[in-house]
Amino acid sequence: MKRDKMKNVVISGVVRPGRLRMCEQSTPKREDDRSPGGVLVGCCGFPKARATYYRHFKVVEVQQTFYRLPEIATAQRWRTEAPTDFIFTMKAWQLITHEPNSPTYRRSGIAAPEQLLGRCGSFRPTPEVEEAWTRTLQIARAVCAQVVVFQCPARFTPTPEHVSNLRAFFQRIERDRMLLAWEPRGDWPDELVRSLCRELDIIHCVDPFQRLPLHGT
């Protein structure tokens, strides 16, 4: 998965047929319906009314789920109102990846996020992070998301603790048949990123105007 952050556009490779998730509300795209070159272009979030967006794009990366998860009924409504061949991808809830003192928590709706320090973020092996993934997964199932993106802050660097947390998290979580994409923003060595993505069966998510992905394209 490749992301153009400057233009708020997500450029995504077509989901591999063997990993395509199926649900009642969606059907796989026919071979002749795919975009040229196997590339799907959409936005990060809905910049216009959803009904208008659906007429122009075939994929979206839901941004809202990073800050604050919607109700399951809301996510189900998004899936129902979208065309049957429309593809949802989404960001994982920030409680998994970001420390509670991150400015992004201002939009979380959590009254006192500082009370979660040491218990959320950085893929910690804690009940709070486990619950955050469980709730993220519920929303992903509701929209029949094909990809879930774990966007990490620059402070999530390749320390032994962070690498251990990352590895343990992706080894133990339930993922259905979804593709999981990891977007590291710290100073991670290429070979470490490549080896972790291969080992954990995750996609390297990048800004294509900055670099090329190392695994999963």
Image (cartoon, rainbow, N blue to C red):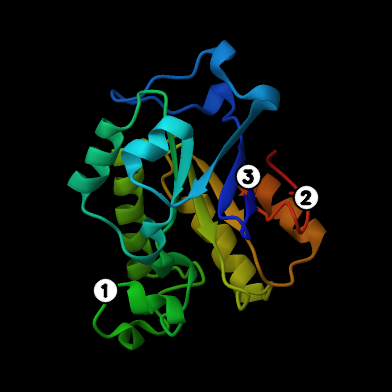
Spot occupied by residue 89 in the image (x, y as percentages of width and height): 46, 43
Looking at the image, which is closer to me, 105 or 166?
Answer: 105
143 w.r.t. 32: above or below: below
Q: The N terminus lies in which quarter of the figure?
A: top right
Give the residue pinned by disc 3: 1
Q: The C terminus lies in which quarter of the figure?
A: top right
78 w.r.t. 171: above or below: above
From the viewer's perspective, tell me whether residue 190 is left or right of residue 96: right
Give the residue pinned by disc 2: 212
The image quadrant that residue 104 belongs to is bottom left
Looking at the image, which is closer to me, 47 or 162?
Answer: 47
> Is label 2 in a helix, a strand or a loop?
loop
> Is label 1 in a helix, a strand or a loop?
loop
Determine if residue 141 is in view: no
Q: What is the C-alpha distance between the residues marked 2 and 1?
A: 35 Å
Spot occupied by residue 179 in the image (x, y as percentages of width and height): 53, 40
Q: Amino acid at mark 2?
A: Leu
Looking at the image, which is closer to me, 104 or 49?
Answer: 49
Mark 1 Cα within 10 Å, few/some/many (few <14, many 20+)? few
Spot occupied by residue 92 in the image (x, y as percentages of width and height): 43, 56
Give the residue pinned by disc 1: 109
Q: What is the C-alpha distance between the residues marked 3 and 2?
A: 10 Å
